Amino acid sequence: MDQKDSPELIQQSRSDQIPFAEQIRYSPISMTAVTSAGLGVFCILGFIFPTLAWLAIPGVVLGVVALRSIRHYELSGRKLARRGIQFSLVCGMLAPLWHLTWYEIRFHSEALPGYQRVSFGEIVNDRKNFESRMESLLGQNICFKGFAIYAGQGSHKHQFELYYSQPRGGFGSQPGHREVVSVQLPRGKSWEWNHQSIAVSGKLVRNPDAKSDPEAPQFLLKQSTVFPALTADHFQGPFSARRGC
């Protein structure tokens, strides 16, 4: 058989006759796959910003829709859709766990071990039973969260008053002596005042100064240790077992 009539040469000659534009088969990319991949990438930021972890839901849904469209309409972008689903699933599950774990770490750093966490704001707002509820805690090691009331005389405090919320400025807006608790640090210790929320661990006793000064707080947290309050009072985390503030 002549070499010119070989099947390979015949096939090559036919392909040479087909226009180059027709030899290239172009498949449009699925924009749904692109969107899914973009959401999956944004889900990585969920480790920093918790709300972005919710993007995992539309990321997975759009990824599944993109795969079906790619099969049905012969589109390109299969790898993008798969990556979008993978990133969304991994980040959507791990990011919330990371934030809950970090919350628990901060929650446990606010109080000394063995100290009962008590919601100071809840007791203050229960005006009818304020004194009886405080008396039930006398002699116990407890932890209150609140804000230190600035009384002048320098920023390093050995003793100060604690209120459950940020005191408002202005005349007549300071809380009354029945709504605050006095905090006393161990001898030789001091705390540098700031306007941030704090958590105070100490032993609750009656304030001896209240006998001679009717305007002094009735109760005192003595031998106290002050930590920054890093968590919100209204949310305790899933592992906190409702242990107060």
Image (spheres, helix red, strand yellow):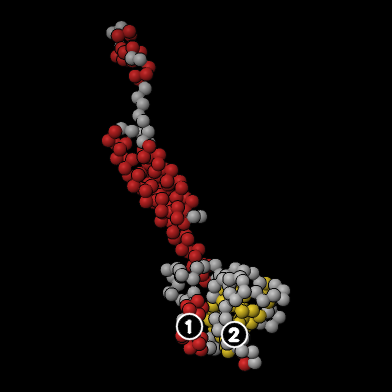
Kindly identify which residue carries mark 2.
Answer: 217
Within 10 Å of disc 2 (Cα), the crowding (few <14, some 14-19, many 20+) is many
Q: Which of 18 and 171 is in front in this view?
A: 171
Q: What residue type is labelled 2?
A: Pro
Kindly identify which residue carries mark 1.
Answer: 127
> From what the image shows, is residue 178 above or below residue 84?
below
* Residue depicted at x 58% and y 71%: 168
Q: Is mark 1 on a helix, strand or loop?
A: helix
The image quadrant of residue 173 is bottom right
Q: Is residue 7 left or right of residue 34?
A: left
The image quadrant of residue 159 is bottom right
Q: Quadrant of the N terminus?
A: top left
- What whole-number distance in Å separates the C-alpha atoms at marks 1 and 2? 15 Å
Within 10 Å of disc 1 (Cα), the crowding (few <14, some 14-19, many 20+) is few
* Residue 66 in the image, given as x and y percentages of width and height: 33, 40
Q: Is residue 146 visible?
A: yes
